[in-house]
Image: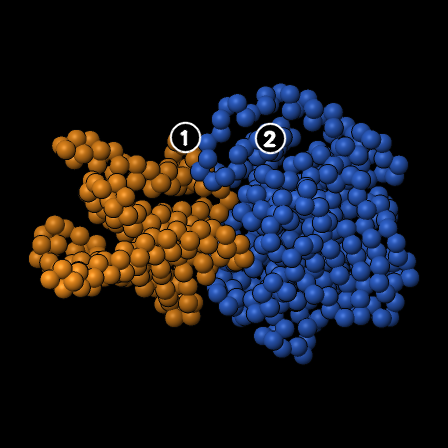
Chain colours: A blue, B orange
Amino acid sequence: MKQMPVSGGLLTKTIWNQLMRKRSTLSVIAPSEITPYEHYVSRRSLLAAGAGLALAPGLGGFARHAFAQAPGALKYVRNAAFSVAEAPNSYTDITTYNNYYEFGTDKSDPAENSQKFRTQPWNVTVGGEAEVTGSFTLEDILKPHALEERVYRLRCVEAWSMVVPWVGFPLGDLLKRFKPTSKAKFVEFKTLYDPKQMPGQRTGVLEWPYVEGLRMDEAMHPLTLVVVGLYGKVLPNQNGAPLRLVIPWKYGFKGIKAIVSIKFMERAPRTTWAGAATNEYGFFANVNPQVDHPRWSQATERRIGASLFGPRRPTLPFNGYADQVASLYSGMDLRKYF
Amino acid sequence: MRWIRWVLKPLVFAACLIPAVRLGLGVLNATGVAHIGDISLGADPVKVMLHTCGRWTLNFLMITLCMTPLKDLTHSIVWLRFRRMFGLFAFFYVLLHFSVYLLLDQDGKLGALWQDIVKRPYITIGVLGLLLLIPLAATSTAKAQRRLGRRWTRLHRLIYLVAILGVWHFWWQVKKDIREPLWYACGLTVLLGYRLWKRRRSFARVSAAPLARTDGA
C-alpha cells in the first residue's frame, strides 16, 4: 500500500494526492474539491525551476515564493554515516501524520491547516549569553551551511515511531557563529506566535509560544540537526517549515518547529511540555524504554506504515543512538531526569 | 406499529453498523486485500480503529441513556423499543475496541494486557466498564427481564456506572486536549442529572401525597 516515491512523476502525484486529499480519517473526497492535476503540475514545474535559487543570497520574489510554497528540490549530500539502514516512511505518512499543536491536536490537522502558512519573510532573534546577537533573516541563518541528508529514527512520546530522511545541518555549526559565552549552559528555542496563522494558538491547549531547550552539550552534539528539508525537498509547512530541530535520541516533542528565537541561557529554560505536565514530560525527554510515561508504557513502539498485523517493536535506549550520546548523561539518574 | 418492527428497526440496526462496516472496508484497503471506496485508515490504522470503536461505544451508551428522557419528553414509549438495541451496540463496539487493543495494539499478549490492567489506571477502569457490561448484555432478553422482575431494573442501573467509567477512561488517556472527553462528560452529566432530578421530584410527590390526604380529611 505505502508507496515510496521513486520517480518524479509518481512523487508529484503522491504529493498532489496528499495536498488535495481531505485528511480526516475515513473521509471521502468530493470531486469538486479537486483541482485538475495538470494545472498543478504546470505550476509546480515553474516553481521548481526557481527552487535552486532558494538558498542563494539575494532571493528574488519568485524564488522566495518557491521556497515558501513549493516542495522545491534542495541541494544536499547524503550523510550515510549518520543515517540508519531502516527503510524510511513514505512522504505521505511523514507529511500527514504528526503532532504540531499550533495547527490543531489531531495528527491530520497540521497538514490540513498549515497550507497557507507564510514562511517568508522569516526572522530569527538570537539573544542571551552570546557575543553575536540580534535579528537575522532566514537567508542569513542558512547561507554558510552545506545541507546534508540524514535518515533518522523518530520516536514520539506517544509510543509510535517513524524513519525520516531529513535535510539540514548540525545545530552546533549554527550556534558557534553566535559565539556563546562561558555563561551559556543552555539554549532555548521558541516557535512563532501568530494566532492568526496558527489556529491552535487560539486555544488554550498549551501555553504559547511553544518553548523548547537543550543543554549546551546536547545542542552542540553532531547528531542534533537544524532541519530545512524532507525527502530532498523544502520542508513542508506541516513539518515545521522553514526551520526546525531534530534531536533523534529524544522524544519528538523536543524537535521544536518554525523557530523564531534562539537564546543562550545560564539556567534551564521552562519548556512547554515539561511545564504543562511536570510529572509526565521532563526537560531531557531522552527516549528510554525503562522509564514509562505515567499513563502508558514506553517499552515498545508501533512503527507507522508497518503492516496492520505487524508486531510492536522494542524501544531502544536513546532511540538506538546510545553509543553516540549515552556519555552525555553518565552519572545522571535517568529516572529522575527523564 | 408493525412497521416499527419490520421497517424502522432493521433500518436503525443497519445504520448502527455503518461505523463498523467502514472500519472493515478500511482494514481491507489498508491490508491491500481489496480496494473498496475511498476509505482510508490513515498512517496509524490501529489507532484509528481503537479510537473509532471507543467513541462509538460512548456514543451508544449516551444514545441508550437518551431513550428514557425522550420517552418523558415526547410522552411516547416508542423510544424504549430501541433501547436494548442501542445498549447491545454499545457492547458490540466495546468488544471490538477491546479486541483491537488486545490483538492488534498489544499483539495478543495477555501478559502485556495484565501489566496494563494493573499498572495503568485508565486501562483498569476501561476493563472494569467492559466487565460490567457483560451481565447487562447477558440479561438483555425479554425472558431474562421477566425472570428477574424488579431485580432486572436494579441490575441494569449499572449502565450509569459503565457510562461514567467509559468517559473517565477516555479522559485519562487523552494527552492534553480534553475538549472531546469534556463534551461527553457534559452530556453524561445532563443525562444522569435528569434522572436524579426526576427521582427527587417523584419522592417529593410520594411524601406530599399522604399529607394532602390528612389535610383533606
Whether marks 1 and 2 lie on the same chain? no
Residue B68 - label? none
Horizontal arrangement in the rendering, residue A276 relative to residue A148 (left or right)? left
Q: Residue at x 80, y 34 (%)?
A: A64
Closest to the observer: A227 or A273? A273
Horizontal arrangement in the rendering, residue A47 relative to residue B119 (left or right)? right
Placement of the C terminus of chain B among the 4 image quadrants? bottom left
**Image x and y of residue A162, in percent:** 57, 51
Q: Residue at x 68, y 22 (%)?
A: A42
**Image x and y of residue A310, in percent:** 43, 51
Q: How many marks?
A: 2
Q: Residue at x 82, y 34 (%)?
A: A53
- The residue carrying mark 2 is A16
Do residues under tags 1 and 2 come within 8 Å of each other at their CB atoms?
no
Subunit under mark 2:
A
Against A7, residue A84 (above or below) is below
Label 1 neighbour load within 10 Å: few <14, some 14-19, many 20+: few
Label 2 neighbour load within 10 Å: few <14, some 14-19, many 20+: some
Closest to the observer: A211 or B67? B67
Q: Residue at x 73, y 38 (%)?
A: A118
**Image x and y of residue A232, in percent:** 70, 40
**Image x and y of residue B55, in percent:** 39, 49
Q: Amino acid at mark 1?
A: Gly
Farthest-out residue, bottom = A331
Q: Amino acid at mark 2?
A: Trp
Horizontal arrangement in the rendering, residue A52 relative to residue B209 (left or right)? right
Distance Cα–Cα, label 1 vs label 2: 19 Å
- SS category of the residue bearing label 2: helix
- The residue carrying mark 1 is B37
- Residue A163 appears in the picture as rendered: no
